[in-house]
Amino acid sequence: MASCRILAVTPATAVFSISTQPEKDLMISPLDALNSAPARTAIARIAPLVERSEWVARDVVAQRPFASTEALAAALVECILAAGPARRLALFRVHPELAGCEAVAGRMTDESASEQARLGLMSLSAQDAERLTRLNVAYMARFSHPFILALHRVPDLAALFAIFDQRLQASPLEEHMTTLAEIASVIGDRTAAAFGAGEGDPRPAQTACPQDTSL
């Protein structure tokens, strides 16, 4: 819808200027709203981008304004990378298992529930459910945290099982680095979904992980 404003008024006539700028362009974007929101509100909006780890949102909120969704996602990932191995491991451990007990009990975040549902993990056959349970148990025993995968990049259940089997063969250091990369991808996808990724504001690229070998 076009907007209209009065330029001048005389006793005989009123002169109007008609703008053809779309009404949607006059509206504030979700990212602009985040940048101008009170800190507490901004933290609440950012927090769901990182699974059950509000401390990341609290740490980056002072970096506003973010120029793009890419900049916001990068700030979140950099915060996690700078946190150190122990705190990163704690962040890994708050993630739900794939089709695990939290999924069965309905205790996952909305974001995780949606991501798992896309691949049908809430309605597995008995055989697939048993296989995934075995993989979850083996992975937890080997790496001491749930298996984390950017499900938005996984095309189907067969691909998920193949990736899971492959990553079980990795060393602890390799898997720590892979898990960070997967979390970065999840953050990028969630940020683009929550705040938009319009022209000149692409979905965040995967952020390189630090070569920190102290696990």
Image: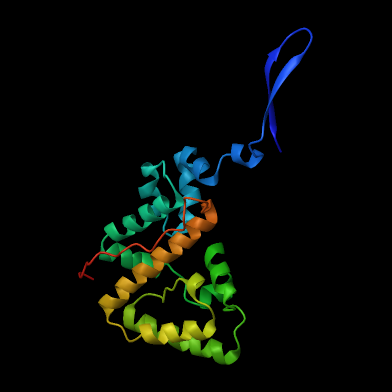
Task: Examine the image and state in which quarter residue 128 appears.
Answer: bottom right
**Quarter of the picture holding the C terminus:** bottom left
Q: Is residue 145 left or right of residue 100?
A: left
Which residue is rendered at x = 27% and y = 57% of the image? 82
Q: Is residue 128 above or below residue 16?
A: below
Which residue is rendered at x = 40% and y = 66% of the image? 183
Task: Compare residues 206 and 57 and report the one nearer the observer.
Answer: 206
Residue 23 pos. (x, y %) = 66, 38
**Quarter of the picture holding the N terminus:** top right
Q: Is residue 64 above or below residue 126?
A: above
Residue 188 pos. (x, y %) = 44, 60
Q: Is residue 111 left or right of residue 123?
A: left
Residue 202 pos. (x, y %) = 46, 56
Please identify the residue farthest to the left as the structure is shown: 214
Residue 15 pos. (x, y %) = 72, 18
Q: Is residue 213 left or right of residue 104?
A: left
Please identify the residue farthest to the bottom as the structure is shown: 127
Please identify the residue farthest to the right as the structure is shown: 12
Q: Is residue 107 visible?
A: no
Which residue is rendered at x = 47% and y = 50% of the image? 200
Count of numbered circles on the image: 0
Q: Is residue 84 visible?
A: yes
Task: Compare residues 96 and 175 and report the one nearer the observer.
Answer: 175
Q: Is residue 65 above or below residue 172?
A: above
Task: Examine the image and state in which quarter residue 135 appears.
Answer: bottom left
Task: Compare residues 112 and 90 and report the one nearer the observer.
Answer: 112
